[in-house]
Image (cartoon, rainbow, N blue to C red):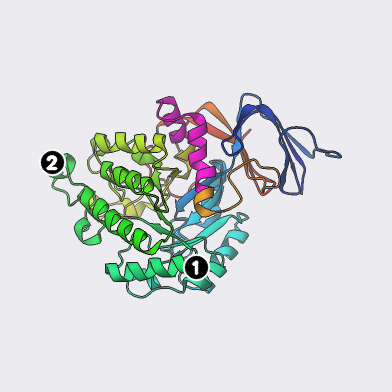
Amino acid sequence: MKNIYIKNGLLIDPVNKINRIGNVYISDGKIASITNEPAGFKADEIIEAENKVVSPGFIDLSTRLREPGQSRKATFRSESAAALSAGITTMCLQPDTNPVIDTSAVAELIKDLAKKADYPKIYPIAALTQKLEGTELSSMLSLKQAGCVAVGNANKPVRNLLILRRALEYAASHDLLVMFRPNDYWLGNNGCVHEGFFATRYGLPSIPEAAETIALAQCLELVELTGCRVHFGQLSCKRSVIKIHQAKKYGLQVSADVAVHQLHLTEDDIIPFDSNYHVIPPLRTDTDLKYLRQGLASGTINSLCSDHQPHDIDAKLGAFPETESGISALETLLPLMLKLVEDGVVSLEQGIAALTSNPARVLRIDSGALTVGFSADVCVFDPDLEWQINADTWKSQGNNTPFWGQTLKGKVIYAIQSGRLAYTNT
């Protein structure tokens, strides 16, 4: 494995409170030093990082790579290439694959696919219930032993609160993290947009914010009852931020993330009949967006994710409610975070922490920092480089993004994963 010397970059590492010009030395796949050159160190590769930011590699808490089961939409190989081009060196894979990640055999299959794609840091999230049907608990302990970092039910409903209570008790007994996307399936009523002005104007089936907040409140009560560690994923509204803030204030073991597009788009931005704006949870109001931004700035929401969901053309054709939800989002994660910095929502250190050390803390993994001895997952990016999203610059197999054709600022130049120079854009 090559020794890599990154020189003269702006090092930003929130864990070690580093924000200065400096160098990074990588040896044997690990961070060897970020101050002085280690004794006997001889660089096989030198990266000039002047006027670039050097940070830990990004950790994405919610992705779907469409394998196994839907390789016509995307593959581990196509999406891992997109991830590396975006500085994402670790991804969590939601359990709603086909077959579902509810057995050790499927978890092993995920690891095998990751290895074949030469992207080893794909962490499977195990299904909370068998086949994600919401009725019988999965074998959580064996799934944890097979390498799953958490359990969750993706966007599928748990049939009743007793089953959810038993699931949280089981997870707590094995110190397993539960990733919970709050959405009351029955209140959601197969809606496709926020219950508000846009839905009324175009006569679309809608999802009230109560579908999220009621599910969130119920789960918080069970967190207090069971003592389980729960991470709430992809929040979308003001009242959810308030409830998470209160829960943290009273000492519950909870954390939360938001999909980064929810911090930039509202229902007012939806172009009628353009299904690239069909996301779940739906784009909500300007007030919700402001509260989500405030929640990120205050630390109530501690992480950003892409909630990456690539689709083929057929999935997005047809009437808006009939199309599949989700956007292809790996490659917009960094520039949309940087836009938050530009807008004064968070500092660059806070933005990087939301993509690195905070997700690592949620998962309890030794990553997300330029700490000596940690695996060398490093991102070198130019925060000022402008680029347009088009067929020439886009690497994901899914082109379903509402930002297509737009010019964004911020581009990864180098990505290093486990000490390997995995991506170069020079």
Quarter placement of the C terminus: top right
Give left or right: position of 339 versus 247: right
* x and y, in percent, of residue 317 in the image: 29, 51
> Would you identify the image quadrant in which residue 84 lies?
top right
**Type of the residue with mark 1:** His
Which type of secondary structure does the marked residue at label 2 adopt? helix
Count neighbours of disc 1 (C-alpha within 10 A) and say few if under 14, some if 14 to 19, many if 20 or more.
few
Question: Label 2 near label 1: C-beta < 8 Å?
Answer: no
Mark 2, residue position = 201
Give left or right: position of 403 versus 75: left
Which type of secondary structure does the marked residue at label 1 adopt? loop
Question: Which residue is nearer to you in this view: 314 or 262?
Answer: 262
User: Does any portion of residue 194 appear in the rendered image?
Assistant: yes
Count neighbours of disc 2 (C-alpha within 10 A) and say few if under 14, some if 14 to 19, many if 20 or more.
few
What is the tally of numbered marks visible in this picture? 2
**Type of the residue with mark 2:** Arg
Mark 1, residue position = 174
Give left or right: position of 35 versus 81: right
| Above or below, comparing residue 72 to residue 255 in the picture | below
Residue, x 69% and y 28% (percent of image)? 22
Q: CA distance from mark 1 to mark 2?
A: 49 Å
Magenta-drawn stretch contains 402: no
- Residue at the outermost front position: 250
Residue range highlighted in magenta: 335-359
Question: Which mark is in front, 1 or 2?
Answer: 1
